[in-house]
Image (cartoon, grey):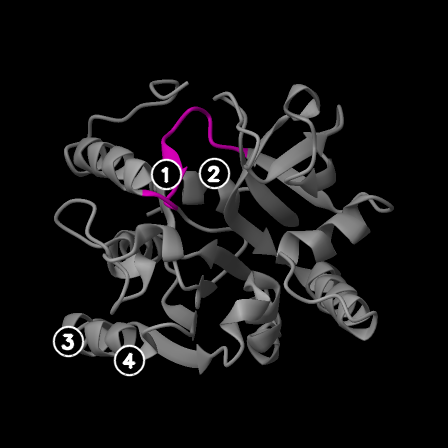
């Protein structure tokens, strides 16, 4: 474990989605409880968080919420880690509403994780070593059309984030992990509220971040440095994640291997 200058000890995990593309595997459990090796996606994320001293975890649940609660109850009763569960009672409104549901726990710096992301634990170290509000970006592999893409200026500041950015203009893919600090926390919450007031729901929380990034220089990029990460949406993604998890568990990953 590294000595964290930022002293972040809280994480918010968004785990409310229906995961329709992975049915029937996700009929009765949230996607994050799918196994990708010896552990589930959720367990690998929690293990990484604990390794870097983040032991206060807020989980926003929706679909199959009880199964995730029960999983935590059974598997983490001996750990010095605190879980709080929040129900997103409108999961169909997308992850922007899940983010907003957890706002009362955003009173200090925290890590935000999408629960369907498998990532090499050292990526968290890279993130925590940087000051300010930072988004993890995979800038080593070719981005796809449906990915959450970013544009980054020469100073490493994120100026745009959207699935609609043309592939040829993208500087990488936001992988669903970020650190939010200080005033940026309040800015994102206010940005979400402004979208809601306009009647704009069923969006991504990245849409709220985009409104800020377009006009201010306050979100920075953290590169994955070629370490593996994958968002798991399909059976193909799940199979690829299992291969990556195998490498991670056996220490077979290194910077640049997955370019």
Label 2 and label 3: CA atoms lie apart by 31 Å
Label 4 and label 1: CA atoms lie apart by 30 Å
User: Residue at image x 78%, y 71%?
Assistant: 199
**Circle 1 residue:** 122
Q: Which of marks 4 and 1 is in front?
A: 4
Label 2 and label 4: CA atoms lie apart by 33 Å
Image quarter of residue 161 = top right
Q: Is residue 47 visible to us here? A: yes
**Circle 3 residue:** 74
Is there a contact, CB below 8 Å, between mark 3 and mark 1? no
Label 3 and label 1: CA atoms lie apart by 27 Å
Which residues are the magenta region?
223-234
- Please provide percent x and percent y for residue 245: 22, 38
Label 2 and label 1: CA atoms lie apart by 7 Å
**Circle 4 residue:** 66
- Majority SS type along the magenta span: loop
User: Residue at image x 15%, y 44%?
Assistant: 37
Is there a contact, CB below 8 Å, between mark 2 and mark 1? yes
Q: Which of marks 3 and 1 is in front?
A: 3
18 in magenta: no
Tell me which label, 4 or 3, sits earlier in the chain. Answer: 4
Is there a contact, CB below 8 Å, between mark 4 and mark 1? no
Element class at badge 1: helix
């Amino acid at each position: 474990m590294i000595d964290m200058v930022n002293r972040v000890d809280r994480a918010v995990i968004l785990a409310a989605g229906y995961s329709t593309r992975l049915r029937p595997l996700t009929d009765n459990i949230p996607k994050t409880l799918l196994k990708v090796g010896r552990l589930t996606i959720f367990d690998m994320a929690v293990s990484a968080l604990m390794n870097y001293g983040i032991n206060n975890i807020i989980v926003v649940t929706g679909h199959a919420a009880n199964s995730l609660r029960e999983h935590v109850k059974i598997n983490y009763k001996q750990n010095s880690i605190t879980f709080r569960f929040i129900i997103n009672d409108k999961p169909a409104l997308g992850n922007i509403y899940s983010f907003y549901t957890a706002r009362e726990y955003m009173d200090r710096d925290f890590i935000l994780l999408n629960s369907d992301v498998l990532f090499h634990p050292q990526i968290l170290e890279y993130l925590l070593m940087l000051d300010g509000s930072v988004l993890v970006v995979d800038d080593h592999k070719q981005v796809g059309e449906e990915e959450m893409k970013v544009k980054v200026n020469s100073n490493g500041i994120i100026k745009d984030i959207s699935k609609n950015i043309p592939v040829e203009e993208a500087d990488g893919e936001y992988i669903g992990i970020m650190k939010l600090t200080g005033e940026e926390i309040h800015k994102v919450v206010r940005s979400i509220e402004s979208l809601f007031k306009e009647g704009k729901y069923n969006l991504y929380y990245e849409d709220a971040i985009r409104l800020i990034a377009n006009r201010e220089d306050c979100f920075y990029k953290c590169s994955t440095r070629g370490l593996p990460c994958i968002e798991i949406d399909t059976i193909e993604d799940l199979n690829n994640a299992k291969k990556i998890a195998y490498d991670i568990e056996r220490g077979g990953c290194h910077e640049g291997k997955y370019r």
